[in-house]
Image: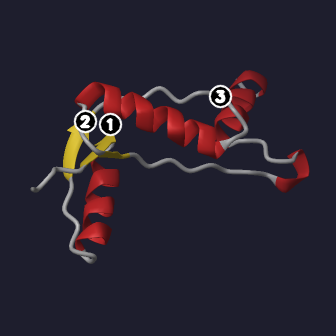
Amino acid sequence: MSSSLFFVSSNKNKFKEASTILSGFGISIEFFKCKLQEIQTNSLEEVAQHKARQAFSFCSKPVIIEDDGLFISVTERLSRTIFVLCTRYYWK
């Protein structure tokens, strides 16, 4: 029984990159275009779990999401999303 695996993102280029990498392992994915909410937290794991649950709620199929973070050690894990919000506020 074959099941489709969906890469959920609003960014087609992320899908293309993931598809290229996964095809090297014999894994094929389909693109499901969707803008996912990014919660504000210092935990990249919480952000990814939230996005994965949200993505599954939209398509009810097995999903892959991609997320990353920029952590600055001096600030003890200041996430990229919080960093961006801060820079927008202070450097308008």
Tag 3 or tag 2, which sits nearer the N-term? 2
Q: Count residues near mark 2 (Cα–Cα under 10 Å), then give few for <14, some for 14-19, many for 20+.
A: some
| Residue 32, quarter of the rendered image | top left
Label number found at residue 33: 2
Q: Count residues near mark 3 (Cα–Cα under 10 Å), then give few for <14, some for 14-19, many for 20+.
A: some
Image quadrant in which the N terminus is located: bottom left
Residue at 28% of width from left, 26% of height from top? Answer: 58
Q: Amino acid at mark 3?
A: Gln
Rounded to the nearest angstrom, the CA distance separating label 1 from label 3 is: 19 Å
Relative to 92, say whether 9 is above or below.
below
Rounded to the nearest angstrom, the CA distance separating label 2 from label 3 is: 22 Å
Q: Amino acid at mark 2?
A: Lys
Q: Is residue 57 left or right of residue 33?
A: right
The outermost residue toward the right is 74
Rounded to the nearest angstrom, the CA distance separating label 2 from label 1 is: 5 Å
Tag 1 or tag 2, which sits nearer the N-term? 1
Label number found at residue 10: 1
Which percent across, then down, holds residue 84? 66, 34
Label 2 with label 1: CB-CB less than 8 Å? yes
Q: Which marked residue is nearer to the observer: mark 1 or mark 3? A: 3
